[in-house]
Image (cartoon, rainbow, N blue to C red):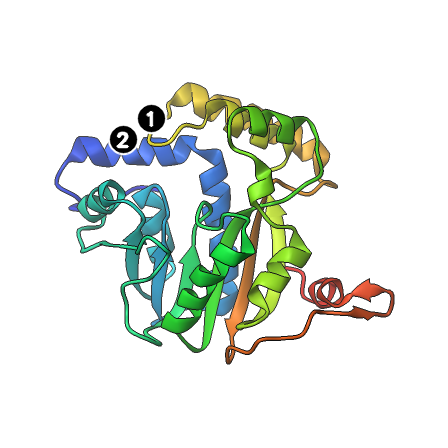
Amino acid sequence: MNLPMGQGNDGGARERWQADFQADRPLRMEIEAVERILAGIEIGTMTCLDVGIPNPVGSLSLRRLGGYWSTVGWTPERCRRAAAILQEEVLQTGAGGELPFDDKQFDVVVVARGYLTGDPGRDVVLIQECHRVLKTPGYLVISSDYRKRANVASLLARRSDQSPNRGYNERQLFDLLKTGFDVLGVRTYCRFWVQIMRLMLDAPDRGKGRTTAFLYWIACQLDALLFFTKGYQAIAHGRRKGWRERQPLGVRHGMHISESVLRRSRI
């Protein structure tokens, strides 16, 4: 996408962020997955919040869908650079994931990959915060690493300190969200070769050039042959309801209830 004219004070910075966004195929896949979900919601004039998108061009991309958007970041530096590109105030989340907004302020909250840690005891705090700032019925769209069994990609991830064990599978995401949300769907993206490239090439705040974009393009072509496999990143969305602690889920018709619900509501 092209940034609107007049956004930001440094044209060179705008160009760098745009080039990085175009080269960062996993982030683009995440934003595209979010956009497909939001297109189904038809956000129109809704109030929306994006949390933790690492490249502000991703935030701009979501704004093209309509709605009135706010952005929060998780470090002072990310907040400053996002504010420079978005030309608006960008607040910082609290150390425990607290969101700096009043109750029931938003219709939609989008949480980028990287906020969920894979520890339900910690992550439920963020889910509660999203529930608090959402209206009823509001929508939560949240990304996570997808927890898979041990394989080549996960072994490489452990060596690079990017273990996918931080993430959740479909059932675990359902269990994390079900207390405050009706889970509408979970899907995965970023298959084997794109994940391998991400682990090899990705580094926080490092510029991404044409070589990175070309390698991701090759990875996407290879992953097209793996269409029958699940990806290494997941995205879930749900509709806010009253917060209510539930009993552990049981089994219905030979399958876990979460599997039954998600099978009926695939994205």
Question: Where's residue 140, x and y in %?
Answer: 47, 65
Q: Residue at x 52, y 60 (%)?
A: 37
Q: How many marks?
A: 2
Q: Earlier in the sequence, mark 2 or mark 1?
A: 2
Residue 185 occupies quadrant: bottom right
Mark 1 belongs to which amino acid? Answer: Gly
Q: Tags 2 and 1 in contact by the CB under 8 Å rule?
A: yes
Residue placed farthest to the top in the image?
211
**Nearest to the observer: residue 76 or residue 90:** 76
User: From what the image shows, is residue 100 above or below residue 214?
Assistant: below
Nearest the camera: 249 or 107? 249
**Mark in the foreground, 2 or 1:** 1
165 left or right of 75 in image: right
Q: Vertically, is 4 above or below 47? A: above
Does the rendering let one see residue 185? no
The residue where tag 2 is placed is 16
Left or right: residue 12 compared with residue 147: left
Point out residue 241 in the picture as x, y percentages from the top left corner: 52, 78
- Distance from label 2 to label 1 (Cα)? 8 Å
- In the image, residue 43 sits, relative to residue 198, either above or below, namely below
**Label 2 secondary element:** helix
Name the quadrant of the N terminus: top left
Mark 2 surroundings: few (<14), some (14-19) or many (≥20) residues within 10 A: some
Most extreme residue toward the front is 121
Question: Residue 256 location in percent, x, y?
Answer: 77, 64
Residue carrying label 1: 207
> Residue at the location (32% across, 74% down)?
105
Residue, x 67% and y 74% (percent of image)? 247
User: Does 157 sit left or right of 6 as displayed?
Assistant: right
